Amino acid sequence: MGEASAYVAATTGDGRLVYLSAKASPPQPGLEQALTSLLYELAKRKYSELLGDRVRVDALRALRAMGFKVDDVLIAVSYRCPQCGASIQLTPEIVVYVCPYCGWAGSVFGEVVSLLAWPAGRREDLRGLVERSGCELVSAELRYVPFWVFEAHVDAEYVALVTYQETRVVPGGPFDRERSTRVRVETRRTRVSGRVVFDSVKALPARFAVEIYGGEQLRTWVQSMWYYGPPQRLSAEEAKRFASSILAPELSEGVARARAEDELEDDAAAEARWSAERQVGGSVVSVQLLRFKPSVSFKRASLVFAPYWIFTYSRGGALYTGSAAGPDLSKLKLELPLSNVERAARLLGSLLAVFGAGVAAELTFRATSDVLPPLLVAGVGLIVAVKLATSAYAPARVG
Amino acid sequence: MPVCPYCGGSVEQQPGEVVLTCPYCGTAFAVGGGEVGEHLMGSVNYAVQQVLDVFRSWALRMPETPNDFSGATRLRDYRLVFYPYWVVQVIGRTEIGGEVEEESVEVSIPAHRSMLRTPLERLRLSLTGKIYYSHRHVVQWNGRLVNPSVSPAEAEGMAKSVGWQSIAERLRRKFGGSFSRGELDVVVTDRYLVHVPVYDCVYEYRGRSYRFMADASDARILYAEVPIELKFRAAALASGALSLALAAALLPLLLNAPLFTLTCAAGLTFVGIFSLYKGLRREVRTVRFFES
């Protein structure tokens, strides 16, 4: 049994450029035209709605209301590249993509996004680095990790209550015939106000599950490289070449901006507390912000892709993981082998510490005939032994 | 049999379920009547084999994992379950120094009691990327749907309490002692029912079975049991036995050198038991999320 089908290019109710298609069975005169107009009508809904059951139920109801005897209707949706018109399947989380056919880069709403990226280090160089350390490269995968980078200006006014301690040298008491002095510690409180102003760069990963080994280090790398070696703009041809290694951003600029604002406000609060602390002499016990009015203005937001190598390497038959970023393959995080010899040495060390503690405790007991000093000596020795024994079973060093 | 308020379809009800999902139109409705708000889901973006590949490379990051792990593991069984969560948006307001401070949080509440005290309890969701519920999608992936046994009202109560804690913590971090917990009011602004696809997999390594769970939308590992290398275990067992033997061998010296003997016996027994514990463990269990 055949089916009637229709296919339209449309913009959804929430502004996404899509292709919508529908199939209904059994075929009957006028059904394809009805499906086409129905698809234009359905396209007015939100993209996420078009993937649900209700849209199908509503389409079925609408077709039946028009007099068609249809058993079932299927509706499919895919993205549409605004440059070459290719149909592109993306997971619903993705907000920006690079068309693998023409290299166009932009949002699912069809807005062009300029791609900024640092050049990636070469696989051969990574292999050389690993081999120079006496290890063998087992696998290496290059990914371009998306970050939203915000350049912001932060200005915050504050009023704070600072509790601090002041040490004063005061004369001895009235009955002190030797006219000696004594030190008095006084706890005081004072109210201070001020303003903190600073410029900052915040990089936020544009993925939900940051499946990055050394993700926090990569974020720091992006923030520092933003100043010291800014990224280059990628042409469409270059973007097409890297499209398969690019992790598509899942976090929109708006969501990232809100998170960046939160983090910057937290930074400003910390800076305000620090500033209040500096206004007071003595030893500060606590700072309470009584009033805090931050204002964050964003000067620029950019989507940038950081080249990131995740690799495994072997040494002495064991496998370790590492990650590196950028053209010069800066180390982000590296598992370092903890050899069996090192483990055995630590274990042996713990046994020696146990014996050492025993001998020291016994000798101290014989010398003092008191129980407390030898117990203290034994305790210290046993703590060292425990630390050495547990470190012998640590999985690996991470550097 | 309960009837869907949107399309009139008959819906099966299992014991304990307080919210049902219509298999025809995807509407979620309370058993007592009425819709429960927007019903969303995470789509399955990873096939089970892809998730297994992600899991293998994730597991290899743990140094106790045997080096032949990738090649020697085999998927034995799996099921894809769509677990329900209530995602509730909570706003907290308070006044500090004459200024109104407002913070909002999105709280995820497991919507079935069987999810409590499991790794699923810790899953934090975002609404971004979630699509309207499609039962066809569940059937297409051969998934099993779990309906909520926690009512919307109960979920809102729990979300208010969790949201209050989270907002209070944030305000306390920012304002320190100036923030008075007693003056924080929280209200629920939105509530969604979200079904999250989770792979529950059993895999085999050298004849033994282990389990892991992963989010089928983004391949995040939620729970994992990973075998420990045999060489590692043998060395630990040997050193454990040696330490305990040494401790026993020292006991005859108790009368002549009591403090020496007691200190050494205590230390060696600890090292021995700790080593035996390390050697007897066959697997590492982890409920940490994917490395970040």
Image (tube, coloured by chain):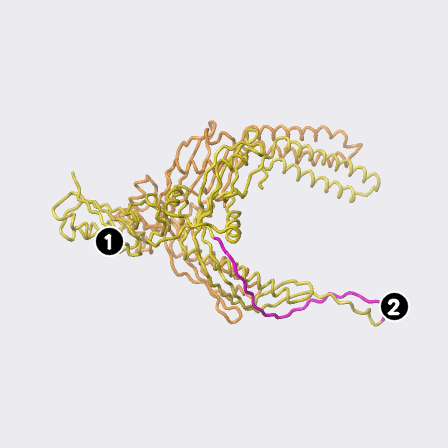
Chain colours: A yellow, B orange
Towards the viewer: A287 or B107? A287
Query: For mark 2, what is the residue?
Result: A178
Q: Is residue B215 left or right of residue B98?
A: left
Q: Which residues are magenta?
A: A175-203
Residue B118 shows in the view? no
Give the quadrant of residue A345. Answer: top right
- Give the number of the disc on residue A42: 1
Density class for disc 2 (Cα within 10 Å; few <14, some 14-19, many ≥20) is few
Q: CA distance from mark 1 to mark 2?
A: 97 Å
Q: Chain of mark 2?
A: A
- Give the number of the disc on residue B266: none
Towards the viewer: A98 or B109? A98
Is A15 covered by the magenta stretch?
no
Compared with residue B195, is residue A190 higher up or lower down, i.e. above or below? below
Q: Is residue A101 left or right of residue A266?
A: left
Is A191 covered by the magenta stretch?
yes
Q: Which label sits in the foreground, 1 or 2?
A: 1
Secondary-structure class at tag 2:
loop
Density class for disc 1 (Cα within 10 Å; few <14, some 14-19, many ≥20) is many
Q: Position of residue A147 (x, y in %)?
A: 45, 51
- The three-letter amino acid code for the residue at tag 1 is Leu
Q: Are marks 1 and 2 in contact (CB under 8 Å)?
A: no
Q: Residue furthest left?
A: A29
Give the quadrant of residue A373. Answer: top right
Q: Magenta region's main secondary structure?
A: strand
Towards the viewer: A338 or B91? A338
Q: Earlier in the sequence, mark 1 or mark 2?
A: 1
Residue located at (73% from left, 37% from top): B263
